[in-house]
Amino acid sequence: MAQVISNLGSAQGNSHRRNSYIGEGLVGLFNRVSEWSERRRARSHLYQMPDYILSDIGVSRSEVDAEYEKPFWKA
């Protein structure tokens, strides 16, 4: 009987660790997608700025165009 209880405890521990790994993976995935979305949004806002504002912040239109053309997953 003690062995059965011990095995049940061990199985529950494995299940908890598995759920923890899945949870960590989902959090990591959410963070990655959130980062990509923020990057896309920031590039879009920068692309829509007029040249005189870009000049004020020290960025050229060609630099903005190059940044805007990057895929969302590239930093």
Image (tube, helix red, strand yellow):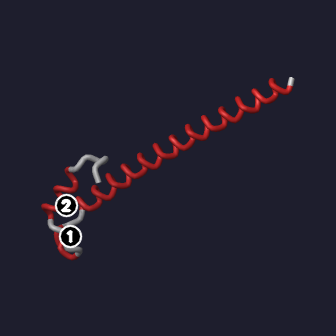
In this picture, is 64 found above or below 4? Answer: below
Query: In the rendered view, would you say 27 is above or below 68?
Result: above
Residue lying farthest to the right in this orientation: 1
Q: Residue at x 51, y 41 (%)?
A: 25
Q: Amino acid at mark 1?
A: Leu
State whether residue 29 is above or below residue 52.
Answer: above
Return the x and y of residue 27 as percentages of the image width and height.
52, 46
Identify the mark nearer the N-term, 1 or 2. 1
Q: Residue at x 19, y 69 (%)?
A: 59
Question: Which of the pair 19/4 is nearer the observer?
Answer: 4
31 over 18 or under it: above or below? below
Q: Is residue 56 left or right of residue 20?
A: left
CA gap between label 1 and label 2 equals: 9 Å
Tag 2 secondary structure: helix
Task: Name the kind of residue labelled 2 in the image.
Answer: Val
- Dot 1: few (<14), some (14–19), or many (≥20) neighbours within 10 Å? some
Disc 2 target residue: 64
Find residue 32 and report its horizontal and vertical position in percent: 42, 47
Location of residue 74 in the rendering, given as x and y in whole percent from the top left corner: 28, 49
Q: Which residue is mark 1?
A: 54
Q: Nearer the viewer, residue 13 or 43?
A: 13
Q: Pointer 2: residues within 10 angstroms few (<14), some, or many (20+)?
A: some
- CB of mark 1 within 8 Å of CB of mark 2? yes
